[in-house]
Image (spheres, coloured by chain):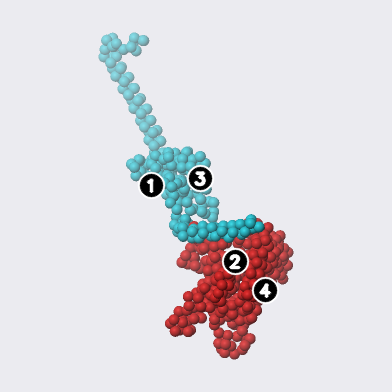
Amino acid sequence: MYELLENTVGNQVIAFFIAAALPLFLFILPYAIIAVLLERKVSAHMQDRLGPMITGYHGILQTVADILKLIQKEDIIPTLADKKLFILAPFIIFVASFAAFAAIPFSSEYIGSSIDVGLFYILAISSFVVAGILMGGWASNNKYSLLGAVRSAAQIISYEIPTAIVVLTMVMLTGTLNLETITNQQTAYFWNWNIFGGAALGLSKFVLIPLMFGAFLIIFISMLAEVNRTPFDIAEAESELVSGFHTEYTGMRFAMFFLAEYANMLAISFVITALFFGGYHSPFGYLGNSLGAEWLIPFEQLFWFTSKGIFFVILQMVLRWTLPRLRVDQLMTVCWKYLIPYSIAILLIVGFITVL
Amino acid sequence: MKQYFINTWDAIWTVLVGMQITLKHVFVPSVTIQYPIVKPELPERARNRLFVNMDDCIGCDQCARACPVNCIDIETIKATPTDSPGITSNGKKKALWVTKFNIDIGKCCFCSLCVYPCPTQCIEMTNVYEYTEFERQDLVYKFATLSSDEITNKQENFDVFQKEKEEAKIAAAKAKAEAAAKKKELEKKEAENKEDAKPKSDDNPKNENE
């Protein structure tokens, strides 16, 4: 893919930029539009409603209409806000959440940038979001925004720890930070996935299965908390803080926060998929192999990767519409008293197993 | 320590139970009524917008008198025999031209008290409930079918008729008076004639009193 781009463009730097930006325009923005509608539909059907039905067939154009409306809205900047930071904040959040996709392997033929510190890069760039949130909340000069931003900062910093420990566990198990390599270790059938103990057969595989399930739960919960989704949305907490750090934002700036939230959901789903669920690999082998059509395989891989990602996105939506919001003290309890001890225990045991 | 693991297990288990319940509801048919497209069925005697069938209205003013908030305003002109409004669908004869039948639905309290006294059942509650207006004045419904020209015409007709009637009355009174006078004279004459004819044989009480 990258070589193809380089040959057509003729310049290495430009080709690199295009390769890195391609998933954003080709994939993530359309996804965000679909996901917003999906969330509304999922929540509606879970509450025995229908959701948007008027715009297009069963309301499929509702998000397009909403974005058109948001573009037309007046861009209000509060008089007493810190103007520069106020304008900068949505861009930082938008860029930070979309930049994470650069290191995610979509298929064997396409990865924005196959860097060897991919996992580390994704963790770093996604925790950069907290800077944008604090910036937006503080610059708004609104007590609710500031409260939301401070809560969000405390939450994200706390939940970075279990995430990092679980990622460390996976790095110890796989021996690499490159997501493409991690994915390729889980090739062939679904029992080679890391959640089922990885590709290596033996007694260690069966010891690893419960540990991996635990690790998956921990990283799922803590990453869910990092992107500020319900049940961990105390940063937005619409019943307490209006809408938290983006209370003062209007129009397109608000839409950027909104799209960034959905992009974040997909990013964490992709990371979890790549770490535990075989990345872009099919669970049953490829149709292209059995038909003898080699060119089909990358498309199949793209299909499997997005399906797994969307599955986790839907799982997050179901969780959001099932669980009530945690209180601040409960939130901290979950992180410090439960997730971190368990993740450290898993880290130690997996360490022993890999050493043996 | 035991409590710690119980808490962990409870957290995972209760989340799964909750998700099972919400996922079950995905397959429950939705209860939404797509309102502007599909309208909910109203109860049989639902009270909404008033409607007056002016073909049947006899202008009796009973609805206006029954209204507790005075939202009905009726004015009528008596019909003349030559220019009658006709009859209602159930055969009642209309005796009045209804020149003004205004219902201020903004005042209406939907008590339906105007509906019951109507002798011809021409005022009724319909099932129309979407009648928002931008101007409050637009909520005053004018049901009278006569144009202003027609109203002046009817008024003139009535005035002429009234005048004629009065004249006729006066004439009739005059005629009556004349007739009475004539009769009296006649009677007098007869009496005189009778008296002239046989004055002593008459057993008249008058005469006795005299």
Name the element at disc 3: loop
Q: Mark 2 packing: few (<14 Cα in 10 Å), some, or many (20+)?
A: some
Q: Secondary structure at mark 4?
A: helix
Q: Amino acid at mark 3?
A: Cys
Residue found at x 51% / y 44%: B109
**Discs 2, 3: same chain:** no
Q: Colour of chain A?
A: red
Residue A214 tag number: 2
Locate residue B130 relative to residue A142 in the image: left or right: left
Chain B: colour as depicted = cyan
Same-subunit check for callouts 3 and 1? yes
Task: Give the mark toward the camera: 2 or 3.
Answer: 2
Question: Which quarter of the figure has residue A205?
Answer: bottom right
Q: CA distance from mark 2 to mark 4?
A: 23 Å
Q: Residues within 10 Å of mark 1 (few under 14, many from 20)?
A: some
Please state the total of marks drawn on the protein image: 4
Q: Earlier in the sequence, mark 2 or mark 4?
A: 4
Residue designated by label 1: B55
Residue at 72% over, 71% down? A84
Disc 4 and disc 3: Cα gap in Å? 66 Å
Residue positioned 55% across, 87% down in the render: A4
| Separation of residues labelled 1 and 2 (CA atoms) | 80 Å
State the residue in front, A88 or A103: A103
Cα separation, mark 3 vs mark 1, equals 23 Å
Q: Of label 3 and label 1, which has the lower sequence position?
A: 1
Q: Could you say which is closer to the camera, residue B116 or residue B53?
A: B116
Quadrant assignment, res A235:
bottom right
Residue identified by numbered label 4: A124
Residue A213 placed where, x, y %? 57, 67
In the rendered image, which quarter contains the N terminus of chain A?
Answer: bottom right
Residue B3 pos. (x, y %): 64, 56
Which amino acid type corresponds to the residue marked 2 in the rendered image? Answer: Gly
